Image (tube, rainbow, N blue to C red):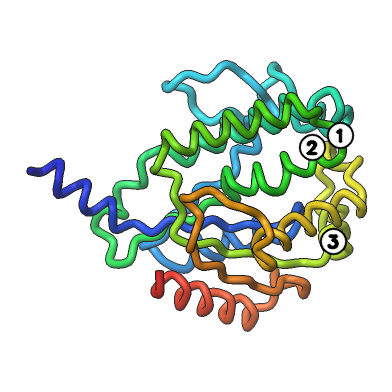
Amino acid sequence: MATEAKKARLNRIKRVAVEGNIAVGKSTFISLLEEESSDWAIVGEPLSRWQNVQCHSERDEEITLSQKHGGNLLDMFYSDPRRWAFTFQSYVCLSRMRHQLKPAPGHLETAAEPVVFYERSVYSDRYCFAANCFSLGTFNETEWNIYCDWHSTMMAAMGELKLDGIIYLRTEPEVCLERLKLRGRPEERPVSLEYLDQIHTRHESWLVHKEISVSDSLKGAPILTMDCNLSFQEDTDKQNDMMSQVKAFVAGL
């Protein structure tokens, strides 16, 4: 009986993905969500795992950038995408699944309006980033077919990855490029405006024009599109407006 009651409490938790291009402003937005409500929890991107690939065990702590061994798969991907695209995108999706399948934080069981926000999802991995690799030819046809088969099978087996809603941070590629340069992540030096434009187009096709056939677990999921072209890092009025929009959005899910 206690187990059923706990399951019912966990089923109340709404799950929302925060999607958008590279350097769109996700980190700033996520930090605002973290500060906004104790009823909300954040599942960030496992970036450090992509920068330092190691064998995972359930007892592992999240690895840090100071560790001296392991492969920097993010750097390998950007440096030689034709060689590493399939490896990178497969590992990105796997590590994200592992992150997003972890139990929700315990305090959400008793929260009045519990929400978990995911920094991107396994769906943008496929519909935007992996699909773009195939379009560019850095995935060959066999790799793309294997990726899609693997992804679809995993999604069918893991109903827990169903989303209740999506927040799309919409920013023009030129703005993303300027923000990317400002943050100065070494691995991202090869990222071009052309690549950012391609990823932007993929997001638009998926979330705005709805031109992509999506997984059953996504069909009908509401989408909140937020214009992030103007910097909101220091603009408290803009921040408050954004959080008001998010609150209204999640209340209606």
Residue 66 seen? no
Question: Callout 2 environment at 10 Å: few (<14), some (14 to 19), or many (20+)?
Answer: some
Quadrant that contains the C terminus: bottom left
- Find residue 25 and report its horizontal and vertical position in percent: 70, 61
The tag earlier along the polypeptide, 1 or 3, is 1
Residue 228, image x, y percentages: 72, 71
The answer for how far apart the CA atoms under marks 1 and 2 are is 5 Å
- Under mark 1, the amino acid is Gly
Q: Amino acid at mark 2?
A: Phe
Q: CA–CA distance between discs 2 and 3?
A: 20 Å
Q: Secondary structure at mark 3?
A: helix
- Confirm or deny contact between disc 2 and disc 3 (CB under 8 A): no
Q: Is residue 150 above or below residue 7?
A: above
> In the figure, 192 relative to 113: above or below?
above
Q: Residue at x 69, y 18 (%)?
A: 70
Q: Earlier in the sequence, mark 2 or mark 3?
A: 2
Residue 97: % across, % down: 51, 36
What is the secondary structure assignment of the residue under circle 1? loop
Residue 134 got which mark?
2
Label 1–label 2 contact, CB within 8 A: yes
Residue 221 place in picture, x, y as percent: 49, 62
Q: Kindly identify which numbered label has been placed on residue 155.
A: none
Q: Is residue 202 visible?
A: yes
What is the three-letter code of the residue carrying label 3? Answer: Pro
Q: What residue do we see at 86% from left, 34% from top?
A: 137
Q: Which residue is mark 1?
A: 137
Residue 46 left/right relative to 97: right
For label 3, the residue is 173
Foreground residue among 126 and 227: 126
Give the distance between the C-alpha atoms of the residues marked 1 and 3, in whole angstroms.
21 Å
Residue 79, image quadrant: top right
